[in-house]
Image: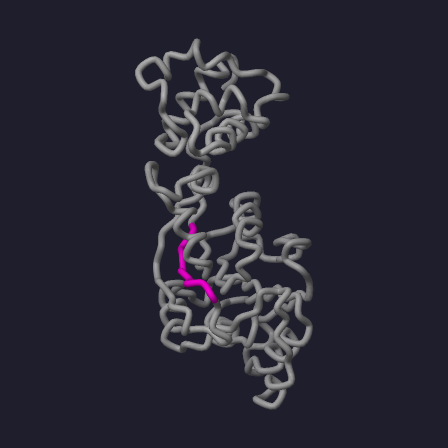
Amino acid sequence: RGGEGGLKKLVRRKSLGQVFLKDSGVVGNILRRAAICDSDDVVEIGCGLGVLTLPLSQKARSLTIIESDSGFLAETCGRIPRECAHRVTSLHGDFTKIGFDKVLPERFVVVTNLPYQISTFFIQTVIANRSRIQKAIVMVQRDFAERLAAPPGNKVYGSLSVFGQFYLNVRKLIEVPRTAFKPIPKVESQVIEIVPRKKPMFELNEELFFRLVRSAFWGRRKSLAKCIRESPFLKDCDPKPIPPSECRFFQDRPLVRGEDLSIKEFVQLYSELFPNEK
């Protein structure tokens, strides 16, 4: 079984963004917010030193660990109490390559201190698997959390905000200081709760809609009408949007910018630009 000696032999890999949560108070707070019980199937991405893994293995009906570092995976699994080991499945692999494809439970909760460099991929994967995910309690970089949860008009509101909130309910839970980690990272962290919506906010051509959204934030200092005219995201789309000059949307606010629009207003604009699309 693993122990302190085994942990000391493990080498942190900077390429994987490995920093390790060491603050037991933060760990306890994450577990309280996750509120895992013996009917929950849980997935953890990146077990690290096992500070979340060990208590999760004792609380959950099942725990699936996805970890790309074989050394940390073996060490953490070796420290799981014998009476809990039958509930734990370890998957050695890169989450950006395997996603949730090898996770056996049909529905599950994600609880993880996420490697920050895969945060956008994680959100995309949660959205793609939203019918399987009950909720996710996730540690991310604070700047990323702010962007994901930002409301219209906020200086960090952008494509990520619209994309995420179109499919997910996002709530910021716990601010985590840099000193909660070893080694101390250069960024602050935030624990967030993600709950997939039962269905997207609106029924429409999602690929076309998000081309419009990306166009709106393509030139943040440009008017929205100019972004639509010049954006590369709408150049080759089929159908093509009608000219902004023909949209009633711009008659009262010709200089409006994308960062000022709510998702509902984006949908209104979409329906005018693409009148023959749902």
Locate the N terminus by quadrant: bottom right
Residue 269 colored magenta? no
Q: Horizontal placement of 174 versus 101: left or right?
A: left
Q: Nearer the viewer, residue 119 or 3?
A: 119
Residue drawn at point x = 53 percent, y = 71 percent: 19
Give the residue displayed 56% in from the left and 72% down from the top: 48
Nearest the camera: 148 or 231?
231
Q: Nearer the viewer, residue 201 or 190?
A: 190
Reply above or below: 8 against 111. Answer: below
Q: Position of residue 17 (x, y in %)?
A: 58, 65
Q: Is residue 112 visible?
A: yes
Q: Residue furthest top?
A: 246
Q: Percent x, y for residue 119?
A: 53, 53
- Residue in the image at 64% along x and 78% along y: 11
Q: Is residue 58 visible?
A: no
Across and down, in percent, residue 40 comes to: 47, 62
Secondary structure that dominates the magenta span = strand
Above or below, comparing residue 141 to residue 90 in the picture: above
Q: Is residue 160 above or below residue 186?
A: above
Residue placed at 48% from the left, 68% from the top?
A: 185
Task: Give the extent of the magenta segment.
Answer: 186-194
Q: Position of residue 157 (x, y in %)?
A: 39, 41
Q: Residue furthest bottom?
A: 5
Q: How many marks?
A: 0
Q: Which corner quadrant of the image does residue 191 belong to? A: bottom left
The answer to whether residue 192 is magenta is: yes
Residue farthest to the front, as pictured: 221
